[in-house]
Image (cartoon, rainbow, N blue to C red):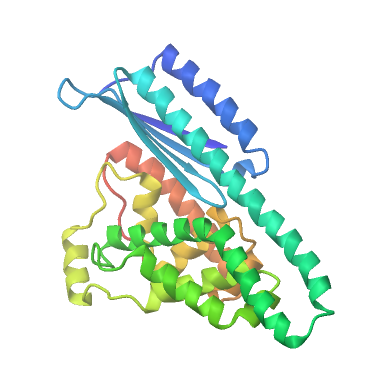
Amino acid sequence: MQVHFSYQHGSPHQELEKIIDMHIRKLEKLLVRFSPDLVHLHGVVEFGTPKSGTGCSLNLWLPTARIHARERGKDVPAALRASFEHIEDQLKKHKEVLRREGEWKRKRYRGEREEAKAQEGELRVQDRQQVREYLDQVLPQLRIFIQREIRFQELSGTLAPGAVQEEEIVNEVVASALENHKGFSDEPAPYHILLRDAIHALNGALPRVESASRQAASDSGDYAVTAETDPVDAFLALLPAKKRQIYVLHALEGFTFDEAAQVLGQLPSEVEEAFREVSREVSAAIQGTRSSGTAPKRSA
């Protein structure tokens, strides 16, 4: 796991480092199924002022989700402990969702063997019910992807704040899956279909800020990205949508380059090359933000 912490209005000390080390060991035990290279933990510890108080913000990036926690406390150690405990609770719930998806796939395999003996009319009903069961399991994960992408587009100024709601995209994706339930049920990787439809809606079917307004905002630097925005969020928000989605699918959703290429309709070699480029730029953006204290610039 890659760990980065920054401190506002203060400096780390032995007690804080001890708390961080202890909770990182706990997280590592919970994260044994994930590749350490694809897990990132970003923390901001706020020593605060008498007016603002103390607090801690944590962002845990996984191949399948991004988990966030922000807590206040009577002092910095209390806020730090509370944030880690919140992250750990969310991580346990997310792992439970992933386990249920695996159970659904095993159930689906058994059901397919039984359905081979059924009549075609019965197949259609059972297939639709299977799709509904599958959607119940994976929609929480899909919602995380959609929420993240909407936030990125709002941060960059591509999408007007509040112009599109997560539920609109979810409803469109679910309607498509149920309308073509037979083809969806036969698909060996149905979650890829959901992601493909969500990305299509996010990239092409949403009301966008007028290009002239976007250009004016770009020239003036007037984006929602601020110094308080997580450095990785800030950089990814300002990438072209396809580049960002390649990085998110491979680094956060855990897709192979072949799978990401299938979802995005690109060649695996193009996806791999774009990911390597963005990955280098993300690392440089984090280091540059720490040194300068400024938000990253838009990538071409």
> Is residue 42 among what the camera can see?
yes
Quarter where residue 168 is shown: bottom left
Query: In the current view of this chain or complex, which residue is farthest to the bottom?
Result: 120
Name the quarter where the N terminus is drawn: top right
- Give me the residue at 22% from left, 69% from top: 214
- Give me the residue at 29% from left, 61% from top: 154
Taking depth in this image into account, of 80 and 218 the one nearest to the observer is 80
Q: Position of residue 144 (x, y in %)?
A: 46, 55
Taking depth in this image into account, of 221 and 178 the one nearest to the observer is 178
- Give me the residue at 57% from left, 32% from top: 27
Quarter where residue 191 is shown: bottom right
Q: Position of residue 48 (x, y in %)?
A: 23, 24
- Give me the residue at 53% from left, 22% from top: 21
> Is residue 299 among what the camera can see?
no
Q: Position of residue 145 (x, y in %)?
A: 46, 59
Above or below, 20 relative to 91 = above
Q: Is residue 298 left or right of residue 94?
A: left
Q: Position of residue 175 (x, y in %)?
A: 48, 77
Q: Is residue 35 left or right of residue 84?
A: right
Taking depth in this image into account, of 108 and 254 the one nearest to the observer is 108
Taking depth in this image into account, of 240 and 188 the one nearest to the observer is 188
Q: Is residue 11 left or right of residue 93?
A: left
Above or below, 83 relative to 121 = above
Query: In the current view of this chain or complex, which residue is farthest to the top?
Result: 14
Name the quarter where the C terminus is drawn: bottom left
Q: Is residue 188 left or right of residue 153?
A: right
